[in-house]
Image (tube, rainbow, N blue to C red):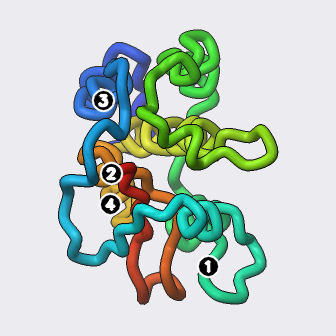
Amino acid sequence: MDIHKKIGWTELSARAKPLLAYLESDSFYRAKYSGTNSGRLIVTDPCIAMDYAIDDSGDKFDDWESLTDSSEIFPEHFEWKSWITHNLNKNNYFNLSKKNFNGADVKLTDSGVCLINEMMHRDIKILLNCYANDFFPKIWSEILEVYLNDGFPCGWNGRYPSGELLVFSNN
């Protein structure tokens, strides 16, 4: 596929149908994570999930945000689409802040900041850019699979590519 092919929101919506169906739900994290455990560290302790998600020291494990959007993950030719951000802002990220997180949002809030809401905004934008580029780095395929199976991907246990994806399961 020509990575520079121009697509619009309509075509992106067709490509990203599984993600958009998930985002249109009124409720998230209502059941325990139901995806594969292979290559995953599943935790139910919100303190552990928060530690992995926000510790950017790199001392114990890779900084999650730096890892997942690094040039090591995305090739130079990957094109970040500003119109995706525009459309997400226009539809208020599918009204994510008004959804029922079944208590996961409360468990993953620190100093008034809802980590799950903040990280989902970021992840949605990156996942839609993956669909728009028709290119999913392995870790982003895993992140998508975790979301679609009621888990919250929030860290990497180890040093990438060794180690495993950390998944918070609400139940």
Closest to the camera, between mark 4 and mark 3, is 3
Asked if residue 131 lies left or right of residue 111, the reply is: left
Residue annotated with mark 4: 142
Whether residue 135 can be seen here: no
Q: Please tell me which of labels 2 and 4 falls first in the chain.
A: 4
Q: Secondary structure at mark 2?
A: loop
Please state, as top left, top right, bottom left or bottom right, where the N terminus lies in the image. top left
Q: Amino acid at mark 4?
A: Glu
Residue underneath mark 3: 22
Q: Amino acid at mark 3?
A: Tyr
Q: Percent x, y for residue 132?
A: 40, 36
Which of the two marks, 3 or 2, is nearer to us in this view?
2
Mark before the other along the chain sequence, 3 or 2 = 3
Instruction: Quote the CA–CA distance across marks 2 and 4.
Output: 20 Å
Neighbor class of circle 2 (other Cα within 10 Å; few <14, some 14-19, many 20+) is some
| Residue under the image location 42 percent in, 85 percent down | 163
What residue did someone put label 1 on? 62
Considering only order in the chain, which callout, 2 or 1, is on the residue closer to the N terminus?
1
Sequence-wise first label, 4 or 1:
1
Q: Which residue is mark 2?
A: 171
Mark 4 touching mark 3, by CB under 8 A? no
Mark 1 crowdedness (10 Å alpha carbons): few <14, some 14-19, many ≥20: many
Q: CA distance from mark 1 to mark 2?
A: 26 Å
Whether residue 78 is situated above or below residue 85 in the rendered picture? below
